[in-house]
Amino acid sequence: MRVLVGCEKSHRVAGAFRAKGHDAWSCDILPCEIDTPYHIQDDVLKHLDDGWDMAIFHPDCTRICNSGVRWLAERNLWEEMRQAALFFRKLYDAKIPKKSLENPIPHHYALDIIGIKYDQIIQPWQFGDNETKATCLWLKGLPKLVPLITIKPDGVQQSV
C-alpha cells in the first residue's frame, strides 16, 4: 500500500509500515528527526491527492484537546482553535480510502467545528504500555483497534 503518515516528524509510524514492505512516507512542516528520503517536509494538505491507499494523521492537539479548553477564553485563542479544527476536518475529508486520525479527547467547541465524533477511545495500557492517556481515533475504512489488555496496570477490570 501507499501510506501517508501526516503530521509526523519522527518517521516512526511510516518507518514501521516501510519495514512491513509498504511504500510509506511521513509528512510534516518540520524536518524529519532521522535521515530518510521518505519524509516530505511540507504542508500535508498539499499532498492529500497524491494517490495514497491509506493515511494516518496526528494533527496538533494544542487548541482542540479538552485539557486546554480553559485557555481559549483566557488567552483569546478562539481563532487558533477554529483553524486547528478546520485543519483536522480537511484531513478527515481527504479522499483517501483508509484513514485514521488520532487526538486526545477534544472539547465541544472543536467537535462542533469538526462535526464528527471519534469512533473509539483507546489507552496506551491496553496495548502493553503502563501509561494512561485517553486517545481518540476517527476511522474511515479501517476497523477499530482490538485491545490486548483489559485489566488496567492498577489491577482494575476495565470494559473495552
Image (spheres, helix red, strand yellow):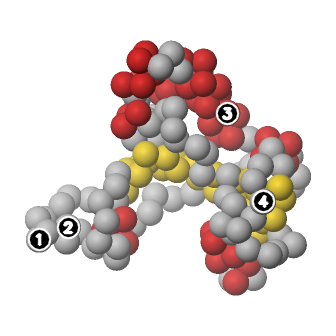
Tell me residue 142's x, y (percent): 57, 57
C-beta proximity under 8 Å, tags 1 and 2: yes
**What is the secondary structure assignment of the residue under circle 3?**
helix
- Give the spatial CA distance, label 3 vs label 1: 39 Å
**Mark 3 or mark 4, which is nearer the start of the sequence?**
4
Q: Is residue 123 left or right of residue 44?
A: left
Residue at coordinates 29% horizontally, 60% vertically from top-left? Answer: 132
Can residue 109 be seen in this snapshot?
no
What residue is at 14 percent from the left and 69 percent from the top? 154
Label 1 crowding class (10 Å Cα cut-off): few <14, some 14-19, many 20+?
A: few
Q: x, y (%) of residue 22?
A: 76, 76
Q: Looking at the image, is mark 2 or mark 4 earlier in the sequence?
A: 4
Helix, strand or loop for disc 1: loop
123 lies left or right of 116: left
Q: Which residue is mark 3?
A: 87
Image marks 3 and 2: residues in contact by CB distance under 8 Å? no
Nearer the observer: mark 4 or 3; the answer is 4
Rounded to the nearest angstrom, the CA distance separating label 4 from label 3 is: 20 Å
The disc label shown at residue 31, or none: 4
Query: Which sits in the foreground, 119 or 8?
Result: 8
The kind of residue tagged 2 is: Lys
Between the residue at mark 3 and the residue at mark 2, the CA separation in whole angstroms equals: 34 Å
The amino acid on which the numbered mark 3 sits, given as a three-letter code, is Phe
Which amino acid, by three-letter code, is at mark 1? Gly
Q: Quadrant of residue 26?
A: bottom right
Residue carrying label 2: 152
